[in-house]
Image: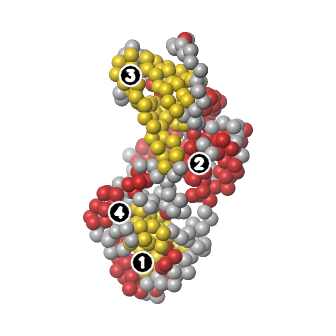
Amino acid sequence: MLLALFIVNTILAADQFTLNGKIDSVSSGSAVLSYKTLIGNQFKKQKYTSEIRQGYFQFKGELKEPINAELRIGETRITLYIEPAKMELFVPKTKSDKFLLKGSKVQEDEEQFLLDSKDLNDMGSQLYKQVQKIDQQIKDTPETDPNYKKMSEQCKLLSSQSDSVFALLDKKRITYIRSHPNSFQPVVDKSIIYLLIFKSINADSARVLFNNMAGNVRLSTAGRETDLYIKTREDKNIHVGKIAPDFNTPDVSGEMIRLSNFREKSYVLLDFWASWCVPCVKGIPHMKSLYTKYHDKGFDIISITKDNSKQDWLSAIKKHDISRWYQVATVQDIEKASQGYIESENISNKYPTNSIPQYLLIDKTGKIIAKWDGYSEENEKDQDKVLKDVFGE
């Protein structure tokens, strides 16, 4: 039925795509299709607009490889995988996420994997909902209540079962990636990246999976994005006892700050933070205390923001009065990064920090001697102890 929606007599040229669409719930208006491609070291956003006539719309354009795209029609937003091909899309009146896309091999691969994993997904989702429900009941129950211990044990058991199910899903995903080296799906839907984020695999395993993929998959926009992410996790130096990777990046005034210039001069605390990070801000008073106490003895702080807005960053520096020590960003230029530029010298490429705040203490030889993840009073006490041992007071 779907294939009968349109009749296209032209032969599709290489590096071209055609997306013929039909949406049940909308008869007029406009549809917007957007996606990004990596050209050189910059992500370029492509955007197409099509008029909707009696529910039908069409997009045509240049496309060299499969890509993750977003379709917007009014308040409806759909994520779909398109490629250089003739494709047909049907969006139902209700539950737009149940759309049907034909002609995209990547979309077909994704849907087949989801179908094969449905039982495990359903089981994991059900267990997760039960855990959330019991966890809320525990929060509303006094510890003195006779049922408190029983509920806690039940929650722990269900959490363990849920973790086991999702671990099986991860194994199924890994097996799929290994057995489909020519499929773009694992890079377009960021499977390998998510496996790394959730610590289902380590960087070495991710590299093996990625290197086993076909050359055209690895060199695609999604492939290069995956490769870059794996590289940020491959750096073995972000551990206590290793030499901290050097960086050379501009501070708020444009002056270049090179980490290795502090060697033989001072101990350096790298503080990864952001203006929107509540725990990061909570730790600022303690850092001020450390800086006041030890700066004259050879102690410096380099705060490294993950902010995407330069104005938010600058405002936070002023608001929290932290311009007394060095302020840099994880990227060379926040404004360019927001436009899609990727710089090889970005600190984010050398220091993978998925959660903040994170603190690294580097000695005068450039070696990492302590690391703290997150904010807590225990971490602050340990920082006090370590610096007291370093400076003798």
Q: Which residue is mark 2?
A: 224
Q: Which mark is residue 51?
A: 3
Between discs 4 and 3, the one toward the N terminus: 3
Q: CA distance from mark 1 to mark 3?
A: 58 Å
Using the image, determine if residue 350 lies above or below residue 223: below
Q: Which residue is mark 4?
A: 281
Percent across and percent down for residue 169 are 63, 39
- Residue at (41% x, 86% y) in the render: 297
Percent across and percent down for residue 160 are 59, 46
- Residue at (32% x, 71% y) in the render: 323
| Tag 3 secondary structure | strand
| Tag 2 secondary structure | helix
Between discs 1 and 2, the one toward the N terminus: 2
Between discs 4 and 1, the one toward the N terminus: 4
Q: Which residue is mark 1?
A: 300
> The C terminus is located in which quarter?
bottom left
Q: Nearer the viewer, residue 174 or 255?
A: 255
Q: CA distance from mark 1 to mark 2?
A: 36 Å
> The N terminus is located in which quarter?
top right
In screen coordinates, is 243 left or right of 296? right
- Residue at (57% x, 39% y) in the render: 188
- Residue at (42% x, 65% y) in the render: 304
In screen coordinates, is 253 left or right of 352? left
Task: Say which amino acid is labelled 4.
Answer: Val
Using the image, determine if residue 306 lies above or below residue 258: above
Task: Say which amino acid is labelled 2.
Answer: Arg
Is label 4 in contact with label 1 (beta carbons under 8 Å)?
no
